[in-house]
Image (cartoon, rainbow, N blue to C red):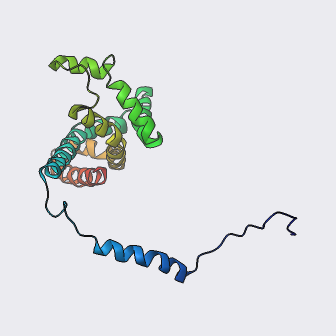
Amino acid sequence: MEVGSGQKALHAKSFSKPDVQAIALPIWQRALTVELTHMDTFSAEIWRSVALTIELASLTTMILLVVGAPLAWWLARSKTVLSKAVATIIALPLVLPPTALGFCVLVLLGPNRPGGFLASFWGEHTLAFTFAGIVVGSVLSALPLVVQPIHNAFIAIGGGPLVMYGTARGRKSFLSRLHTWERCGHVYGL
C-alpha cells in the first residue's frame, strides 16, 4: 500500500519484553520505596469499616440461609406456574447489570415504595442509604447464588427418600442421607 502525499503510514508498535521492563521496572522500584505513613496501624475508621463489613456479611448469610433453604425446597418440589415465575425473579440479579440492579433496589427502597412503607414502622422515611437497605440489597443480589445450588441439591435428593422416611426403619438412614445432601447443598450455596 502506497502512502499518498502528505499522509503518513501508521504502524502499531509492538512492545518487546525489554521495552516493558524498561517502563515497569522504575515504577516497581518507586513503589517499593514509598513509605507507609498513615497506614501503618489500623485507625478507628478502618476498624469501623471492618466491623460493618463483618456485620453485613454475617447478617446477610443468616438471612440467606433462613430464606434460601425453604425457598429452594419449595422450588424443587413445586411444579406450578408461580414457582417458575419466582425462580425467574430470583435469577434476575444474575442477568441484570450491577448498575441496573442497584437502581432497582434504590427505587424499591425509596420513600413512596415498599422500602419506605416498611421504614415507616420504625419512624424512618426511607430504607435507601441505611444499613437495613444495604442488607436488603446484599440479600437480593446474593439470593440466586444461594438458592440455585441448594435447589439443585434438593432435586438430586429426589422424592424417594421422603417415601422411605415414612417407615420406622428408614428414618435413621434418611436423616443421615438428608444431612449429607443438605450439607453439600448448603456448602455450595454459601
The image quadrant that residue 70 belongs to is: top left
Residue 99 is situated, as x and y percent measured from the top left of the image, at 43, 38
Residue positioned 19% across, 48% down in the render: 49
**Residue at coordinates 35% horizontally, 29% vertically from top-left?**
106
Farthest front residue? 6
Does residue 156 appear left or right of residue 173 in this picture? right
**In the figure, 5 relative to 163: above or below?**
below
Where does the image place residue 184, in percent across and percent down from the top left?
Answer: 27, 55
Is the N terminus in the top left, top right, bottom left or bottom right quadrant? bottom right
With respect to residue 144, does 132 lie above or below? above
Q: Residue furthest bottom?
A: 18
**In this rendering, does residue 157 appear at all?**
yes
Left or right of 84: which side holds 118?
A: left
Quadrant in the picture for residue 141? top left
User: Can residue 73 be spotted in the picture?
Assistant: no
Residue lying at 40% horizontally and 73% vertically, measured from the top left: 27
Q: Position of residue 132 (x, y in %)?
A: 22, 32
Relative to 112, is 44 above or below? Answer: below
Figure disc tally? 0
Tell which of 139 and 119 is nearer to you: 119
Q: Nearer the viewer, residue 118 or 85?
A: 118
Residue 33: give x, y in percent of width and height: 29, 75
Frontmost residue, 148 versus 78? 148
